[in-house]
Amino acid sequence: MTAIVLTNCPAGLRGFLTRWLLEISAGVFVGNPSARVRDALWEEVQQYAGQGRALLAHTTNNEQGFTFRTHDHAWHPTDHEGITLIHRPDPKAPTTDPAPRNSPPSGWSRASKRRRFGRG
């Protein structure tokens, strides 16, 4: 069993996938193609997804009974002792911006900061 989920992808890609898989809901495709066809479909999805995101899940012979691949997702599959888990980014993690937007740039004198931002 194979499932492909598309989000914000071109309509042409959805039409292409309907040749091999059944679209059971908008952007959700299921079917049972061979491994060779599944891999070829995934290559096409990655090439033509554009600004969209894609997820492929299929059955396999492992502990979980399935595996999955992602394309342009914020969540990434991570192998943890033979089991695939989803790594979600922490929304509370500090940003890569070195200075907050409201703070003055480094290099200003203390007096200039007080005058500019009214501290003191």
Image: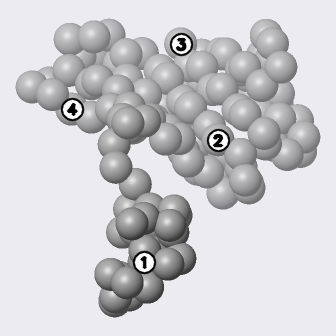
Q: Which amino acid does label 2 sit on?
A: Arg
Tell me if I can see residue 86 in this picture. Answer: yes
Circle 2 sits on which residue?
Answer: 53
Classed neighbour count for the residue bearing mark 2: other residues with Cα under 10 Å, few (<14), some (14–19), many (≥20) = some
- Secondary structure beneath dot 3 equals loop
Decide: marks 3, 4 in contact (CB < 8 A)? no
Which residue is identified by label 3?
1
Comes first in the chain, label 4 or label 2: 2
- What's the amino acid at mark 4? Asp
| Nearest to viewer (mark 3 / mark 4) | 4
Residue 118: percent from left, percent from top: 50, 67
How crowded is the residue under tag 3: few (<14 C-alpha within 10 Å), some, or many (20+)? Answer: few
Discs 4, 2 touching: Cβ within 8 Å: no
Q: Would residue 117 be found to the left or right of residue 90 on screen?
A: right
Residue 97's spot in the image, x, y percent? Answer: 42, 65
Quarter where residue 91 is shown: top left
The amino acid beneath tag 1 is Lys
The mark lying in front, picked from 2 and 1, is 1
Q: Do the residues labelled 2 and 1 touch (CB within 8 Å)?
A: no
Q: Distance between the residues labelled 2 and 3?
A: 21 Å
Q: Distance between the residues labelled 3 and 4?
A: 21 Å
Of the residues shown, which amino acid type is indicated by label 3?
Answer: Met
Give how far apart the Cα atoms at labels 2 and 1 are: 45 Å
Q: Do the residues labelled 2 and 3 touch (CB within 8 Å)?
A: no
| Secondary structure category for the residue under label 1 | helix
Residue to which mark 1 is pinned: 113
Asked whether, in this view, residue 3 is left or right of residue 112, the answer is right
The label number, if any, that marks residue 79 in the structure image: 4
**Residue 47 location (% of width, % of height):** 66, 57
